[in-house]
Amino acid sequence: MPRRRFTPALAAFAVAAVGVIVAPQAPASAGDAGTAGATSATSAVQSTTTPSAKSRGVRTNFGMKASGYGSRVRGNQIPVDSRDTGYTSTGCTTRIGENGSNTVANVDLGGIGSVGTLTTDLHTEKVGGEIAAVSHHELAGISLSLGGLASLSIQGLMTTARAYHDSTGFHATTDTQLAKIVVTIAGVPLTLPLPTISQPITVPGLLRISLGRSEIKKKADFASARAKAVQIDILATDTTVKLAASYAEISDNIVKGRFSGYANTTRAAVLGDLVTSGPQVKTIMPCRGTGGVVRTKNLLGLDIPGVLSVGAARSSEMGKQSRNRATGFTQSELANVNLLNGAVVISAIRGRVNVELDSKNRVVASTNGTTIGSITVNGTETPLPDLGTLSIPGLLEIGTNVVEKVRGGLKVIAVQVKLLNGTGATINLGEAKLQIRQR
């Protein structure tokens, strides 16, 4: 069999065959300016070292958090999502040497393709005069089928986000690296130039590959860094795949307690959590609280065809602290929810958690303010608080005021719906969680 030669003409044919539009590559870096790019040069994030035994576990005046994931799939035409693969978080901590790691061998993206090995490293550290939170993700690669004889692979994805404090204040840096993009036509591989922030690679009518943007925020008492390696938009289904995302933050004024928690209006899990919708309208409590300011998010409506229709929804949170006391709340509200094409209607849902850490470091927590208005089943209205748990054989089971104790606080689900129609779906409505722990 004669040896096949890969000529420039064949390369040009391969690109033309899939209609790839390639932008010229331009170098980029990331730092306090908040930019990111594909690069094999020296990392823009300063190298770090493992904290010494002497410093490990030392408490600081800073609240630090690091988190991230390997892949996330969001479908816009059909509002069903994949779970975040390899998600890891340190939570809010004031101590040096906290760490978290996760390794995921292989992930099937449900017909879109597959993701290779993911390695996650999160930690807090003290290096010289710097105290930092660091999030680092490495993804071996992703493979996508383009249909017919065409395929695409992206290799060597890496992101690092670092937020730190030194003698000059708060800072943050990011680093994003992408090694290689290869399109294969009829068994012939072609290495493509790498995309830039402003000019992605596009396969017309099929997908677009964009270099992930970095985001850096800085204030006098806070800094955060967010980096994402690659975003792939599948145009035909309006689906987005995000890869290798890293986040780190550090803040001052943790004088009494460390806050953590969230509020979200809806969260649905189907088929044993393999696919999910939500959490929707989610607010996340910062480490230091909100400085006494009530922060809110609103949504006009949400539909999961055949399962769930939600009217106006809102989530809110507040947290404040002094040297003697820390207090706050998280809350989610839904005006009305229709289930199973209107067969069941639930109105005026609110889930709320209130937590206080007092001067003697005692935690007082409650779900006061959690309320449910009424439920209408096939036109018959009944006040939900009088029902406790309602079962409709073969259709659904509804529980109210589902409370879970957590360290330093509580979690509440105002209404939990379990569908009994074979989908294995669980829908949480009016979910809130809040913890306050000693600094």
Image (cartoon, rainbow, N blue to C red):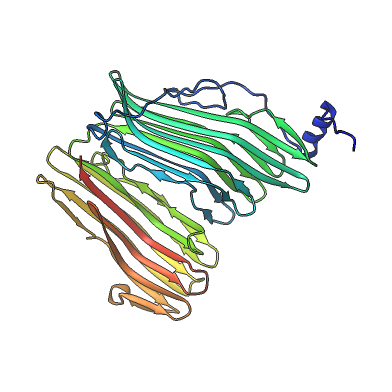
Determine which quarter of the picture holds residue 46: top left
Q: Is residue 300 visible?
A: no
In this rendering, position of residue 148 left or right of residue 166 = right
**Is 43 placed above or below 188 here?**
above
Q: Residue furthest left?
A: 360
Q: Is residue 317 visible?
A: yes
In this rendering, position of residue 56 left or right of residue 35 = left
- Where residue 89 appears, as percent x and y from the top left, is 38, 43
In this rendering, position of residue 436 left or right of residue 277 = left
Q: Residue furthest top?
A: 168
Q: Nearer the viewer, residue 5 or 211?
A: 5
- Where residue 413 appears, as percent x and y from the top left, is 33, 62
**Is 27 placed above or below 55 here?**
above
- Where residue 170 appears, as percent x and y from the top left, is 32, 25
Q: Residue furthest right?
A: 2
Determine which quarter of the picture holds residue 180: top right
Q: Nearer the viewer, residue 189 or 431?
A: 189
**Is 402 placed above or below 24 here?**
below
- Where residue 222 appears, as percent x and y from the top left, is 31, 30
Q: Nearer the viewer, residue 134 or 242?
A: 134
The quadrant in which the C terminus is found is top left
The quadrant in which the N terminus is found is top right
The residue drawn where x is 24% and y is 60% is 369
